[in-house]
Image (cartoon, rainbow, N blue to C red):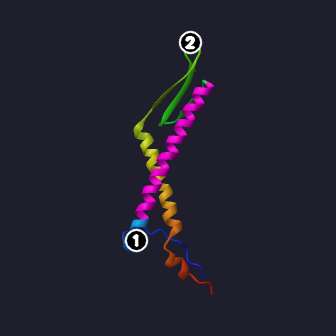
Amino acid sequence: MSQPRTFNAGVSGTPNEIAGRLFIIVCSLGIAIGVVATAGMLLAASAFATASTFVVPLVATFEGFRDAGGTNAVTVTGSWTMTGVVTIIGAFLLSFFLLRSSGSSADNNAIVDH
């Protein structure tokens, strides 16, 4: 009989398990920062190339236009605070799902169908 998976983010466990959890959390933050930065750069490049405006509500506005000389330009206005909030939420969700799905290998090996 299979047992349901549960989220166990407690600090109990061996030092290796705690270090593994911290590593997952730090890597999730790095991945979230990379995704948000890449999305911002892609939106800025698209606004620049197409001379159009893209708006991410509460986060940033990417306004592409042609200047007086006829060359493309882009202006980015936004909130660093909301960008940080979006990044932290993304990192939290990623680490939550990774920690929930990984579990410990001892728990996964102990489940036996009868």
Q: Residue at x 48, y 73 (%)?
A: 104
Marks 2 and 1: CB-CB under 8 Å?
Answer: no
Percent of width and height locating residue 99: 48, 64
Q: Quadrant of the C terminus?
A: bottom right
- Of labels 2 and 1, earlier in sequence is 1
Image quarter of residue 72: top right
Judge whether 21 appears above or below 14 on screen.
above
Q: Nearer the viewer, residue 99 or 42?
A: 42
Q: Amino acid at mark 1?
A: Asn
Residue at 50% in and 43% down: 36
Which contiguous range is marked in magenta? 21-50
Residue sitting farthest toward the bottom: 114
Above or below, comparing residue 31 to residue 7 in the picture: above
The residue located at (58%, 17%) in the rendering is: 71
Q: Quadrant of residue 78?
A: top left
- Element marked by disc 1: helix
Front-lying residue, 25 or 78: 25
Q: Residue 66's x, y, as percent?
A: 58, 18
Task: Count neighbours of disc 1 (C-alpha within 10 A) and say few if under 14, some if 14 to 19, many if 20 or more.
Answer: few
Residue marked by disc 2: 69
Q: Say if the magenta span includes residue 38.
A: yes
Q: Which residue is mark 1?
A: 16
Kindly state the secondary structure of the residue where label 2 is placed.
Answer: loop
